Amino acid sequence: MARENPDRLRDLLIKDAAKLQEEGKLDSYITKVSDGLKSYFKFQRVPFDGFPTMSPIRGASLANERVPTPAELGRILDSLTLRGRTTALFMAHSGLRPGVLGAYQAASGLTLGALPDLKLEREIEFSETPFVIRVPASLSKTRTMYTTFGSSQLASTFLSYLSERRKGGERLTLTSPIIAAKPGRGAAITSKGNATNDTEFITTTVLVRELHEVLVATAPEGVEWRPYVLRSYCSTRLMMAEGGGKITRDLREAILGHDTGVSGRYNVGKTWGPDLLKEARMAYKRAEPYLLTTPKAEDGNEAATKVIRLLLEARGIPKEKLDKLDIGSMSDEEIVALVKTVGASPGTEKKAVQKAVSVEQVPKLLEEGWEFISPLNGSMAVLRAPQSHE
């Protein structure tokens, strides 16, 4: 038609664009249609430039979208099926794209073999958490293999999902998909019908369909959520953890499967050795509380830091001064010296009422009348001296 009557085609395109605008479609949406036709005409070597003039605004479709809070993510998860919760947590806590879990036409997807910490024995379990997820280059948007991690909350949900699949008669192997279709049930029929291969993988469209429906239903008034907001949640929460000193920017970008640039290419951009993997796992664990939808009990280090802070505050150190101290990074010797000196007058030899000692010294001092106060960073304890020492 463009060769024979370009004026008529131009009029049709302008009319269709006006109709789409009346329906509330954004200029960016209408432009995508024009771009498709431009590519087709170029391929067919048809000269035509009568496309309607549009003024697309970048990001206009996301104007009402914001990242959910942990509490809001918790409500989203409560509204999903077990498979949906698993999918959502792989996106929200591990940063996986939907196309990693289920590819176009169900041709491929992430398998259980990508989780080296998963043990498919009589009892399905993880040998360690956070657990490692290795995304192959064939499923990566950057076409580069990368490593990310799964949280304790994801581990618990995923193990329940795998147990449900095993009870349903599925034989789980390293080649089994992480998110599987259920033959003969609902959307899985559509998934199998759209598949080009006879596999147990699920199409990306079906994968996000349940997420989309629940996100629309649970979004607060005036807010719009689409499935990709779950990956945005992971990125945003890790950014907050980065601000809190829990994880580095290069590692955050690597976990999200981004191109880490020149600086990242020389460290996290290469195959990770045992030492780097261990450090990355520890960093993700430090950042994990930022991702969880329910508060996590303080780990030993955080609890010990809190005890030390309360002790020092009780001994008279101003709160403003404590705020400037990085107690968590202080060595045992520095903590002991600080506890000993607090409250002592200059030039006096008065012993501290309370004392931090190594665990090995505790039994002997308890026999001498010292009173146990609290544990301290796992290797020491705080004791109160008997009255004769005060």
Image: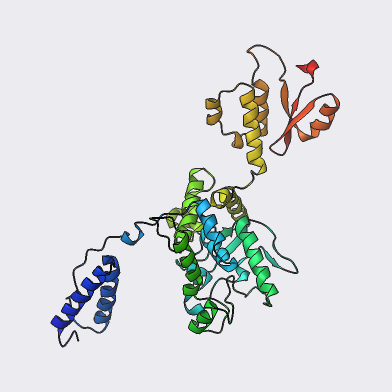
Locate residue 197 relative to residue 127 in the image: left or right.
left
What residue occupies the far left of the structure in this picture? 7
Seen at 58% across and 58% down, the residue is 149
Locate residue 273 relative to residue 20 in the image: left or right.
right
- Between 55 and 107, the one lying in front of the other is 55
* Residue 101: % across, % down: 53, 70
Seen at 26% across and 66% down, the residue is 27
Residue 272 appearing in the image: no
- Between 187 and 251, the one lying in front of the other is 187
What residue occupies the far right of the structure in this picture? 367
Which quadrant does the N terminus fall into?
A: bottom left
Residue 314, image quadrant: top right
* Residue 177: % across, % down: 59, 73
- Between 40 and 275, the one lying in front of the other is 40
What residue occupies the far bottom of the structure in this picture? 4
Vertical arrangement, residue 212 with respect to residue 308, above or below: below
Seen at 45% across and 53% down, the residue is 263
